Amino acid sequence: MIYSPYKVRSPLYCIKFNKSNHIINTVAGFVPVAAGVGGEGEILLGDGGRKLVVVLVDGMRDDTARERLGFIEGLVDQGRGLRAHAQSVLPSLSRPCYEAICTGTQPVENGVTSNDTVRLSTQTSIFDVLLARLLPGWLREGYDVVVTADHGMDEFGLHGGPDDGVRRVPLYLFSSLLAKGGAEIGQTIAQTSLAALFCRLLGVSPADTMQPLPVDIERDWFSR
């Protein structure tokens, strides 16, 4: 299933995998994709020459990523990327998390409060969500790459509540803009700040409604 209420003309693509083991098996694959163009609700972004791919995994806990995403962990270990954490919004359900990631707003603000909410977004967003299989080719093609998840899950495979295993998800970042090529960062970024992070990577201004990128994240991740 793919959630894509946004039509965006931009150098930013978001790929969502529905099962954690699916991305584990295909993260090293490369298939070119194209963003949707034109139509009602289209958001035009500035062309700063930067390109970004966002890989969004459904229901991947932070500790599962560390144990199973050996390829990506290897890139960090080789000094090619950064590993941090993101904390999902509440409720920690897929559609509210998608909306938070896309728009930088809380469910109480955007109205997407459950997986039963099926409508066009009313907030300013920065990308389409596409489903595909890819990764190393993006780095060869000069893309910045972000890999994260919408939410985790508990030992019973459930989610929606405030437990750490449900809300704490991995965040991997590969970009030439990073102050440190590869690092294990203990910082946690709010899921509602990811939209501003994507804008930072693309060199465009975030919408006023988006939660800003924290000052310490800007300093520690990007200051040289």
Image (tube, helix red, strand yellow):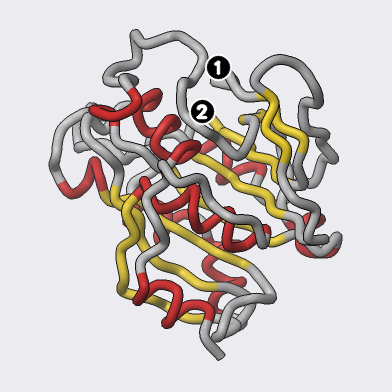
Most distant residue in the front direction: 208
Whether the residues at callouts 1 and 2 have beta carbons within 8 Å, the answer is yes
**Residue 169 location (% of width, % of height):** 35, 50
**Height in image: 55 above or below 35?**
below
Q: What element carries label 2?
A: loop
Q: Where is residue 31 in the image (x, y as percent from the top left)?
A: 82, 40
Q: Mark 1 points at which residue?
A: 1
Disc 1 marks a residue whose amino acid type is Met
Q: In this view, does 174 lie above or below 198?
A: below
Q: Distance between the residues labelled 1 and 2?
A: 7 Å
Q: Can residue 159 be seen in this view?
A: no
Taking the image as shown, residue 165 lies to the left or right of residue 54, namely left
The amino acid type of the residue labelled 2 equals Asn
Residue 204 position in % (x across, y down): 64, 56
The residue closer to the viewer here, 59 or 98, is 98
From the image, which quarter does the C terminus lie in?
A: bottom right
Q: Looking at the image, which residue is at 34% across and 20% down?
A: 112
Residue placed at 58% from the left, 41% from the top? Answer: 23
Q: Is residue 219 visible?
A: yes
For the point 22% across and 29% down, which residue is it? 91
Which badge, 1 or 2, comes first in the chain's sequence? 1
Q: In this view, does 10 lie to the left or right of 126?
A: right
Image position, residue 187 (x, y; %):
31, 71
| Side (left or right) of 134 relative to 1 | right
| Residue at the spot of label 2 | 18
Residue 119 versus residue 6 in the image, above or below: above
Quadrant of the snapshot with the N terminus: top right
Disc 1 crowd, CA 10 A, few/some/many (<14, 14-19, 20+): few
